[in-house]
Image (cartoon, grey):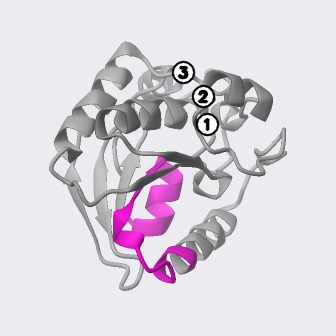
Amino acid sequence: MILVRHGESHFNVHYSKTRIDPGIIDPRLTDRGMDQAKQVAEDLGPYDHLQVIITSPYWRALHTAEIIAESLNLPVHVDPVVGERAFFACDIGSPTPELKARWPRFNFADLVEQWWPDSGETHDGIQARSDRFRDRMAAHPAWETHLVVSHWGFIRALSGHEVSNASVVRFNPVTGDSKVFGDAT
C-alpha cells in the first residue's frame, strides 16, 4: 500500500518556525500544501493499480485526498483510525456534518459527529491503533490497491519513518517492510 502524509498546513508553517502550538484547530492546507498534493498525484499517476483512498477525517488530509482522488479518479473512504495522534490544537477536528457538506462524494460511513479524541493520545495508544490498522490491512486480500492519506504521527507509528509533508511511503502490512520513495522537501 501507499502512505501519503498530507500537504503542508497552516499549523505546520507556524510550528516549524516556533516549535510552539499556534492553537489552530483543524488547519487548512496552505497554497504550498495544495501544490504538494498535486505533485503527489502526478507522481502516483503511473501507479494504476491503486483503487481506493483511505483518509483521515482531518481537513488537511481530506483536502490532500481530494486533490489526489480527482487526479487519479479514485473513491475516498474516511477512517479516523488513520488520524493523527491527538496532541496539539490542530488535532481537534471538524464535526462530521461540516465535513460531509464540504466533501459530499466521500464515504464517511458511520463517522460520529465528534470523531476525534477528547484528550491527548499516548505513544502506546497511537502504536496500538496503528498495529490494529496494520493487522486489518494485512488481512485484506487487495491491500496493495490502497492509498492512505494520513499524518506524521500515524505514519511514524505504522512504518517507523518520520516524514515531511506530502512524503510518500511504500508499506507492506504483511511484512512491515517500508520505504520512503517520495519526499516533498
Marks 3 and 1 sit apart, C-alpha to C-alpha, by 9 Å
Residue underneath mark 2: 103
**Which amino acid, mark 1?**
Tyr
Q: Amino acid at mark 2?
A: Trp
Crowding around mark 2 (Cα neighbors within 10 Å: few <14, some 14 to 19, many 20+) is: some
Q: Please tell me the numbered disc located at residue 75.
A: none
Q: CA distance from mark 1 to mark 2?
A: 12 Å
Instruction: Give the residue number, with chain letter if any, for mark 1.
Output: 58
129 and 46: which is toward the camera? 46
Q: Residue at x 40, y 45 (%)?
A: 74
The kind of residue on which mark 3 rests is Arg
Range of residues picked out in magenta: 136-161
Label 1 neighbour load within 10 Å: few <14, some 14-19, many 20+: many
Answer yes or no: is residue 79 visible. yes
Which residue matches tag 3? Answer: 28
**x, y (%) of residue 73?**
35, 40
